[in-house]
Image (spheres, rainbow, N blue to C red):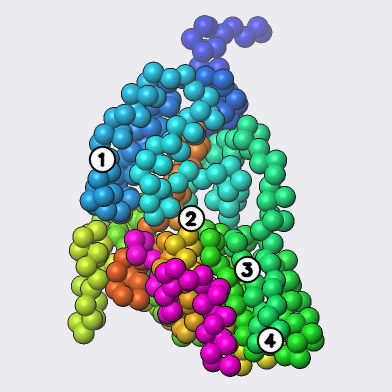
Amino acid sequence: MKRVYSFKSKVVIIFLVVGMLCAFLPSCANQKNEVVISDLEVIPSELLIEDYEEFWEEFRNNYIFIPILEENGIEIDSIEKKYRETLEKSELDIQGFYLLLEKMLGEMSNFAHLQMVYPSWGKYYIDSEYDMLLNETPEKLDVCRVTYEKLQELMPNEEEMEYINFLTPQVSHYYDTKTVCIRYRTFLYDEGDRDRDLLLEALSNAMDQMGGIENLIIDIRGNGGGNTEYWRGSIVGPLGGQDGWRIETFIKDVPLLADTFENSDDEGVFESDFTLSKSYGYKPISEYPKDKTLPPFVEQLGLNYYSEDEETVKDTSEGDVDFSGVNKYVLIDGYVYSAADNFAMFCKNTGWATLIGRPTKGDGAGGMPMGVILENTGIIFRFSVTASPNDAGELNTIKGTNPDIFTLKEDALTKCLSVISSNG
């Protein structure tokens, strides 16, 4: 018997088939994004406007330093209006949209790591073992991964290897005082193993050549950071580690840091659970010790959670050589930022080394900045979500870390060598 289908039946079957395909594909909508968005020479303006509006919603809801930007004369509303008008008049591809956002964040001074995630950084956010993208979904990550592959194709860093080689730590010797100086221009995590071996080899050679080492100078002037695990694993750990490091951080229960879940007792009502209060030991400000004074910026920024834990940087030395008797000095200046400032904070807090130079640029507390993926384009922007006091109780993000020995006109290395000679 011949089976006869009506037109209506055919339509139903077509929709069923399409529905089954969508169930097995990561996401029909995002499949379109993967194929179309990042490859288009001109991305439909409505999609870019959606991402632009998403940026500003996430920014206003989660970026805790807006009061500081406004105090410094940065007019947030004017910037939003200005770049929206520019976007509405422009025809942009994925690179053009990325660069427009990058320029916009530059007008906000990239304060507290407020930055676009560079093409070469994408892998650290997309495929990291750390939970740094708290708004991530598999579909968003799929789009993001394709977008960053495209951005790397459009914005290649052809001199990357030469740049990395240029940034290799440089070693100098001062035989009269049995001093070794190593300059670190960056804390590139990918080069941590290489630079740990370089440090140990340099110190071993110096001990043979000078008959011992009495002083070690670690020069991080101009170092804009990289990753905090670098200095832990490539500098401090190999030299014996250190315990007793305490760092106080403050945070706000912004939506980006909260998990939303359905209340089983009241169907359809959703509640937020501040994830970091459970996962990372943050406590409500109401529990802050009564014998301590809250830093002024806590109220200014509306921060309502805090944490203070004691950490240990693990001893990863092989035990063949004892560096505990070596006098250690770290040179700093106003360009030391992020992970490099984190190292300076560690030295200041524990006394692991004497800091010489000028106050750092700061923002070294709180770990890697959080990232947010924009829905349509898969582009990521990031920013710091924590605030910490420096040794004077001021906001580290503004005031940085203060040296133990301050220099104004005198070169920090010259001053350090002078201190070593006078102590000798």
Residue 80 seen from this side: yes
Residue 132 circle label: 2
Reading the image, the residue beneath label 1 is 75
Q: Which badge, 4 or 2, is on the more N-terminal residue?
A: 2
Q: Are marks 4 and 2 in contact (CB under 8 Å)?
A: no
Tell me the SS state at disc 2. Answer: loop
Residue placed under numbered mark 4 in the picture: 176
Inspect this view and state whether residue 19 appears: no
Q: Nearer the viewer, residue 352 or 116?
A: 352
Q: Residues within 10 Å of mark 3 (few under 14, many from 20)?
A: many
In magenta, the rendered stretch is 397-424
Please give the name of the residue rendered at 59% of the width and 61% of the height, measured from the top-left corner: 186
Q: Quadrant of residue 173?
A: bottom right
In this picture, residue 141 sits left or right of residue 113: right
Nearest to N terminus: mark 1 or mark 4 = 1
Whole-number angstrom distance, CA of label 1 to CA of label 4: 56 Å
**Residue that label 3 marks:** 183
Q: In this view of the protein, which residue sits in the foreground, 263 or 330?
A: 330
